Amino acid sequence: MDSVKNIPLSWAYDWLQQPKRQYIDGQWVDGTGQDKWVVTNPANREALCEFVMADAEQVEYAAQIANQRHESGVWSKVSRTQRADMLRQIARLIREHTEQLAVLESLPNGKLFTESMADDIPTCADIFEYYAGWTDKFYGETSPVEDGFLNYTVKEPIGVCALIAPWNFPLYQTSLKMAAALAMGNTVIVKPSEYTPLTTIYLMELIDSELEFPKGVINMLLTDGAMANQLTLSHNVHKVSFTGSTGVGRKIVQNSGLSNLKAATLELGGKSPCIFFEDTPNLDGAIDRAFTVMFSHKGEKCSEPTRFLIHDSIYDQVLEKLIAKANAVKCGNPFDENVDQGPQCNEAQFNKILEYIEIGKGEAKLVAGGYADTEGDNANGYFIRPTIFSEVDQKARIAQEEIFGPVLCCTRFHTTEEAVQMANATAYGLAAGLYTGDVSRAHRVAEQIDAGMLFINRYGCYGLAAPFGGFRQSGWGKEMAIHSLSSYTKTKGVWVYYGDA
Ligand code: NAD
């Protein structure tokens, strides 16, 4: 892989040789657990690095320290201007090290280096800059109470925030949580996915060596789900911001009830529909866009449109184009600029997707892909061809359950009512898209679809000023924009009596 030009791969392999440790209270410390975790490269299964995981005692120690630092006010009492400045400095560090971070993002995840370089890493810098601007703009109100009384509200930091991230957008997810939590004056414990911790570790190293954050404001635990579970049970943690699977989301809610009723924001799974009505404007452009959103990042995206609902009159035409596009995709080394799709992130995910493909073969008509790509250099990697099933019944498991890979289900419909009914026919409600030239129908259908984000005539629009998050079993609460700030604060109401008696 070192032959790939203009990418700091040699630098990355040198960096991988250095020990990977926990970051607690401004110190780098060895993990105290019994077990080691090996981070692997999904393109060829090579071991990239390893770390000793934190155990329950170390997890609780980090939570206690973060709480002590919170209570001492080392961060919450820092002036808002200074807080903003520190966040801007994190953004600067990310911008200055974009190439290094992009390599460390793509290596263990398998996403294209160009995706990391052009989108994922620069957006992390944008996020810190965006939330730097909010430190002095999110404030309370005076309430319209009776004469002689004043009631005002104050937004206070919530305390220690455990920020638990998945492996699909590692640094992006961590940044989204960290920037908002720090902007509101909280202390944080960052827990990256054990599969993809490299960019978070490197960012912590940059922060530690180049910035003057008070000790214990930013902490990082390298460990697995079992120990992250302990973190969500800690009485020293006041808020969990979690992005990951719906099953773990349920566990976090249970753990909140079993411990201190900590707050939780949950960004969970999805099975999002995209409806193509017969009057889809610029049909070719619509297919291109929806296909790209579905299959980019190897289909490991929570809000991707995994169910295409296509009007009967254009079904065959759309399907033919989709099949041609899927068959043209080149799978391979994510650092090769001629490659369209890298490997799935890890073995468990690879096996899970292949199992769903086998299930799908018994439920619907396989029209593209449907197998692991083991051509040439791909033989040792977790590559799966873009896969399309046609004539999928909405009751089928492949239409109901989140696969989280390059597997698309296509279904034909005849009426608008039928399309809406199909769109709402799963337990999820993360996102939905619809394409139509009829503006009234667009709004009517958007109103009827029970999803947290609706995309009309362009699937997959995102912006930091727009809320992100789902309904039903896709989660609770919103990230991005002003919406995430209320979840990192608590609102205190203060009464003042200034009457005569
Ligand atoms: P996951 O739920 O297995 O793991 C996510 C994180 O939680 C990891 O850091 C893991 O170590 C930790 N974890 C595991 N068990 C835990 C427990 N019992 N308590 C606390 N933490 C625990 O998810 P994943 O496989 O890393 O990511 C894929 C999932 O994430 C998919 O379901 C996808 O839809 C979802 N996702 C959702 C969004 C969104 O914004 N809605 C975005 C990205 C990914």
Image (cartoon, rainbow, N blue to C red):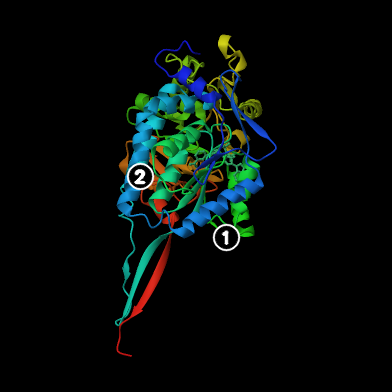
Which amino acid is tagged 1? Answer: Leu
Q: Could you say which is closer to the camera, residue 275 or residue 471?
A: 471
Give percent across and percent down for residue 317.
Answer: 43, 22
Reading the image, the residue beneath label 2 is 86
Is residue 305 toward the left or the right of residue 51 in the image? Answer: left
Q: Nearer the viewer, mark 2 or mark 1?
A: 2
Mark before the other along the chain sequence, 2 or 1:
2
* Image: 279 above or below 469: above
Q: Residues within 10 Å of mark 2 (few under 14, many from 20)?
A: many
Is residue 381 something one can see in this rendering? yes
* Image: 59 above or below 376: below
Instruction: Name the disc covering residue 50, or none.
Output: none
Is residue 169 something one can see in this rendering? no
Quadrant holding the C terminus: bottom left
Judging from the image, what secondary structure is the residue with disc 2 in?
helix
Residue 370, located in which quarter of the rendered image? top right
Q: Quadrant of ligand 1?
A: top right
Q: In the displayed orientation, state which residue is furthest to the bottom.
A: 501
Give percent across and percent down for residue 93.
Answer: 37, 34
Is residue 327 toward the left or the right of residue 497 in the image? Answer: right
Q: Could you say which is closer to the camera, residue 104 or residue 461?
A: 104
Residue 194, located in which quarter of the rendered image? top right
* Image: 74 above or below 51: below
Which amino acid is tagged 2? Answer: Met
Gap between marks 2 and 1 measured at Cα: 31 Å
Give percent across and percent down for residue 303.
Answer: 47, 37
* Image: 465 above or below 7: below
Reading the image, the residue beneath label 1 is 261
| Residue at x 35%, y 30% (from the top left corner) | 96
